[in-house]
């Protein structure tokens, strides 16, 4: 079970294996320019969560818009049932 804490709980994270880097890469839907590479999926996710937390804090501190809203219903990735 994963417990989401802090300001990053509202964001959408994905961790996948990167054959090119031979490491796991974590990405964030709401901050597509950010990513984090690590040897385990847990470390990749933890590293990116910390980075996103820092970026959000910097944006708020400078008075900039944080943005980072999730996709509206019906606009995200679609899944096609198999079978």
Image: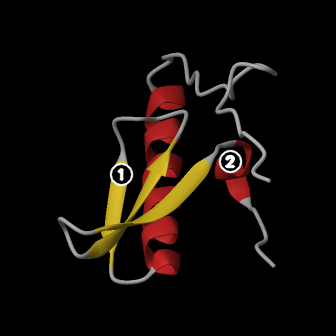
Q: Position of residue 31 (x, y in %)?
A: 46, 35
As drawn, the label of residue 35 is 1
Identity of the residue drawn at 51% across and 70% down: 46
Q: Position of residue 49 (x, y in %)?
A: 53, 58
User: Which residue corresponds to mark 2?
Assistant: 7
Tell which of 7 and 38 is nearer to you: 38
Quadrant in the picture for residue 18: bottom left
Q: Position of residue 4 (x, y in %)?
A: 75, 62
What's the CA distance linking mark 1 and mark 2? 17 Å
Between discs 1 and 2, the one toward the N terminus: 2
Where disc 1 sits, the SS reads strand
In-image side of 56 versus 34 (left or right): right
Q: Alpha-carbon neighbours of circle 2 within 10 Å: few (<14), some, or many (≥20)?
A: some
Identity of the residue drawn at 67% across and 27% down: 76
Where disc 2 sits, the SS reads helix
Q: Position of residue 45 (x, y in %)?
A: 51, 66
């Amino acid at each position: 079970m994963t417990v989401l804490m802090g300001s990053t709980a509202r964001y959408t994270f994905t961790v996948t294996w990167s054959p090119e880097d031979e490491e796991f890469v974590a990405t964030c839907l709401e901050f597509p320019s950010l990513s984090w590479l690590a040897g385990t999926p847990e470390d990749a996710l933890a590293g990116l969560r910390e980075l996103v937390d820092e970026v959000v804090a910097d944006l708020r501190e400078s008075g900039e818009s944080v943005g980072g809203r999730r996709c509206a219903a019906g606009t995200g990735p679609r899944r096609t049932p198999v079978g």
